[in-house]
Amino acid sequence: EIVLTQSPATLSLSPGERATLSCRASQSVSSYLAWYQQKPGQAPRLLIYDASNRATGIPARFSGSGSGTDFTLTISSLEPEDFAVYYCQQRSNWLFTFGPGTKVDIK
Amino acid sequence: EVQLVESGGGLVKPGGSLRLSCAASGFTFSSYSMNWVRQAPGKGLEWVSSISSSSSYIYYADSVKGRFTISRDNAKNSLYLQMNSLRAEDTAVYYCARTFRGLVSYYFDYWGQGTLVTVSS
């Protein structure tokens, strides 16, 4: 089973700042990686798929990069609605795994 | 508009059973594989099970294999999860999610609001 780790666990930033979130896989997942945003009491929302493609309706301030074992989600300038928990996710042989999440909170 | 609405959650004793349902609308349900993903209180996301569009392929997480059964009824636009031999560690919000096929892999593009399952004596 491929294990995903995310860092940092918590990121404290102010609106307007740049957020850089990391996801590392225990073995290569090529570009088979997605990022989700989850706000309290809500279902997750797909942000990025195939490592770098924005899902429908996702603002351009969200971008993803990486391949193999190291991936990054960047939020170029934090808006108030971006403070949430972010998860990475991969699929290998029809087994899906998620990372433990990074909470982006207001400094 | 794509909508996924889960139901069937509740309080059940350890060893008991529960059947979750997910009613889909706003898309051609029979063309998509579907999934259940759960989230224990205050914890992260855990994939539970997937079923292909025609039910030909079914997959489970090791944590639920042999206890949970996923199924679907394309005529009723509905997805199900039969949960048997429930344990305290199965306590979670259970989400129904649609499979999205990216260029190279599969993800979850639409999610329901979730239904809470609590396993406690």
Image (cartoon, coloured by chain):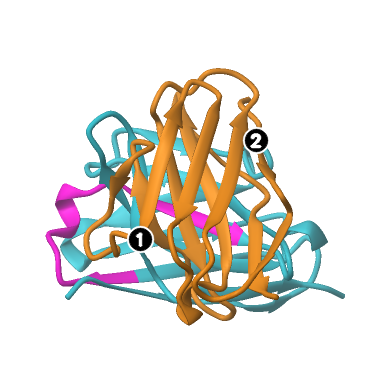
| Chain letter belonging to callout 2 | B
The span from disc 2 to disc 1 (Cα, nearest Å) is 37 Å
Residue B109 in the magenta stretch? The answer is no
**The colour assigned to chain A within the rendered structure:** orange
The amino acid type, in three-letter code, at marker 1 is Arg
The amino acid type, in three-letter code, at marker 2 is Asp
Q: Nearer the viewer, residue B116 or B101?
A: B101
Is residue A62 left or right of A27 when viewed as pictured?
left
Q: Which residue is mark 2?
A: B62
Is residue A54 left or right of A99 when viewed as pictured?
left
Residue farthest to the right, as pictured:
B121
Q: Residues within 10 Å of mark 1 (few under 14, many from 20)?
A: few
Q: Residue at x 72, y 54 (%)?
A: B85
Q: Is residue A105 above or below residue A34?
A: below
Rendering coords of residue A18 (x, y %): 52, 59
Residue farthest to the left, as pictured:
B28
Q: Which residue is mark 1?
A: A61
Rendering coords of residue B48 (x, y %): 55, 48
Q: Which mark is residue B108?
A: none
Rendering coords of residue B113 (x, y %): 45, 76
| Chain letter belonging to callout 1 | A
Which chain has been coloured cyan in this picture? B
Q: Nearer the viewer, residue A40 or B115?
A: A40
Q: Residue at x 22, y 59 (%)?
A: A56
Q: Residue at x 65, y 35 (%)?
A: B62
Is residue B18 left or right of B14 when viewed as pictured?
left
Rendering coords of residue A68 (x, y %): 49, 20
Q: Residues within 10 Å of mark 2 (few under 14, many from 20)?
A: few
Q: Which residues are magenta?
A: B23-38
Q: Secondary structure at mark 1?
A: loop
